[in-house]
Amino acid sequence: RIYNGISTNNKFDKDLIFSISENSVGIIGNLEKRKGHELLFRAWSKVISSINNSKLYIITSFNSGDKITLEKYAKELKIENHIEWIPYQEYIENIYRNMKLVVIPSISHESFGRIAVEAMAFSTPIIASRVGGLKEIICHNEDGLLFENNNDEALSNSIVELLTDKDKCNK
């Protein structure tokens, strides 16, 4: 049993409270340092140099970490206009259904990776670091892409690959 899991049934009738761009990448979860937001931001600066119309959606509880420091870091990297902060919401299923892909850039202590399993339930492609349980539930190039921990270059390459290769992304 996965507590606090999501249901793939009966929740598709709710509208999103925001619009999602075509080249949408989401990170879902709290803002703890171990979740790798800074790593993702460094990768994201490279992604937007290749795909300018891409948007990173950070779905989180705003009091779950240091949002102010992350916002400053995004501004320092000049990526703040390519990021949208979304409060965690009851119908998270709609986010999975509408995202082009989900990224899990954890840098440590990821025992299972519930977000990966939830994304899989909605056939949303996943890119995750080879940390903890993530490497156990995602088979690289089969049901997601894995990158080496703390490697923002590999992460950005994987994001660009899936955003530009529709067939691979759909697979």
Image (cartoon, rainbow, N blue to C red):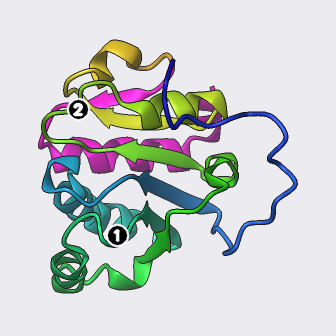
Residue 49, numbered label: 1
Q: Position of residue 150 (x, y in %)?
A: 12, 43
In the picture, residue 85 is in which quadrant?
bottom left
Q: Residues within 10 Å of mark 2 (few under 14, many from 20)?
A: some
In the picture, residue 161 is in which quadrant?
top left
State the residue position of label 2. 110
**38 w.r.t. 147: above or below:** below
Quadrant of the rendering where the C terminus is positioned: top right
Is label 1 or label 2 in front?
2
Predominant SS along the magenta part: helix
Q: Position of residue 14 (x, y in %)?
A: 82, 60
Q: How many marks?
A: 2
User: Which residues fall within the magenta stretch?
Assistant: 143-171
Per the image, label 2 sits on a secondary structure element best described as loop
- Mark 1 or mark 2: whose residue is earlier in sequence: 1
* Image point (14%, 35%), residue name: 149
86 falls in the magenta region: no
Q: Residues within 10 Å of mark 1 (few under 14, many from 20)?
A: few
Nearer the observer, 164 or 150: 150
145 falls in the magenta region: yes
Residue 73, numbered label: none
CA gap between label 1 and label 2 equals 30 Å
| Amino acid, disc 1 | Ser
| Amino acid, disc 2 | Glu
